[in-house]
Image (cartoon, rainbow, N blue to C red):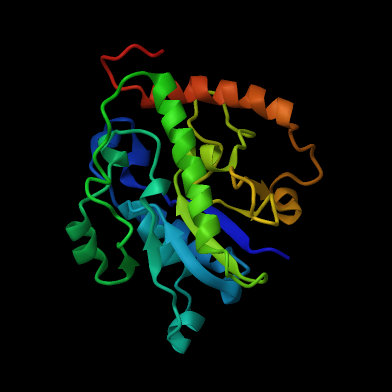
Amino acid sequence: MPVTIHLVRHAQGFHNLSRENEMLPDPQLTDLGKQQCAELRDLFPHHNKLTRFIASPLRRTLSTCLLSFNTESHEANGDYPQLVAMPELQEVSDAPCDTGSDRYILRDEFNGLVDLSRLYDEWNVASEWTTWKAKVEATQARASKARIMLREMLQFADEDEHVVVVTHGAFLHFLTDDYHGVEPLNATGWKNTEYRSYHFEDSENLSPEARLVETPESWRRRQGDSHRPTEKEQKVLQEIFLKQLEVFVTPSGHNKL
């Protein structure tokens, strides 16, 4: 079997409590969020197979990964792989809650537990807003880049390896090209600390898109025997999702186009 990638949405952060809290810069996890991490840690069945940990460089994603997957077996053996922060995995919006902290702040807070070498200068500086269409295209390009980078990082991995990638609710839809399950007036169909498992669609690693496909086991765990959306149905769901997401992401004072 190919490498299995477990995609995870972060636990509850303080920004999840209200729309007003979205003005909090790079918020921490709530107490409930920490409890969700403990529950994920107890629930996740593949701890002994995990070899790599990758996350968006925001506090809530880094903390979710460290609290959910730093198991006693890794600690006892002294073989816990360092968590790698990947800026391409950050969230879609440019709100304060989705803007990461400077590298020196993260270095001091996480005290060597996180590899920050991939954080380039001004990684957390948003580009100037133009249009929603341009934002969507830029996010799609970033998601494609993230998949390709993940594939490159894993090209020499053993086939039975399992990898954890912790990122954000809205961005996960761009990363997976899966828009199923998003309720009306929501920006994501992923619950806090929900995990889903994926393989790269192209086992030869030649596809320029490096698309991910959810494993049958993961789909059954979530959806039972229900029908998987076709590519045509996903296009319809994508259009609905983007219209909903536009309301959340477009800055105030800008036309929602």
Query: Which residue is more in the foreground, 103 or 192?
Result: 103
Give the quarter of the figure containing the C terminus. Answer: top left
Query: Which residue is more in the foreground, 149 or 189?
Result: 149
Q: Is residue 239 left or right of residue 26?
A: right
Hey, which quadrant is residue 159 in on the image? bottom right
Q: How many badges with numbers are in the image?
A: 0
Hey, which quadrant is residue 251 in on the image? top left
Q: Position of residue 196 (x, y in %)?
A: 61, 52
Residue at screen point 44% across, 74% down: 81
211 vs 234: above or below: below
Hey, which quadrant is residue 178 in on the image? top right
Q: Position of residue 79 (x, y in %)?
A: 45, 83
Q: Is residue 237 left or right of residue 52?
A: right
Residue at screen point 63% across, 34% down: 181
Q: Is residue 174 left or right of residue 2?
A: left
Whether residue 30 is visible to the viewer of this picture, yes or no, is no
Whether residue 152 is visible to the viewer of this picture, yes or no, is yes
Give the quarter of the figure containing the N terminus. Answer: bottom right
238 vs 26: above or below: above
Q: Position of residue 212 (x, y in %)?
A: 63, 48
Residue at screen point 55% across, 57% down: 151
Q: Position of residue 35 (x, y in %)?
A: 43, 59
Residue at screen point 39% across, 63% down: 84
Single out the residue that lies furthest toward the bottom.
77
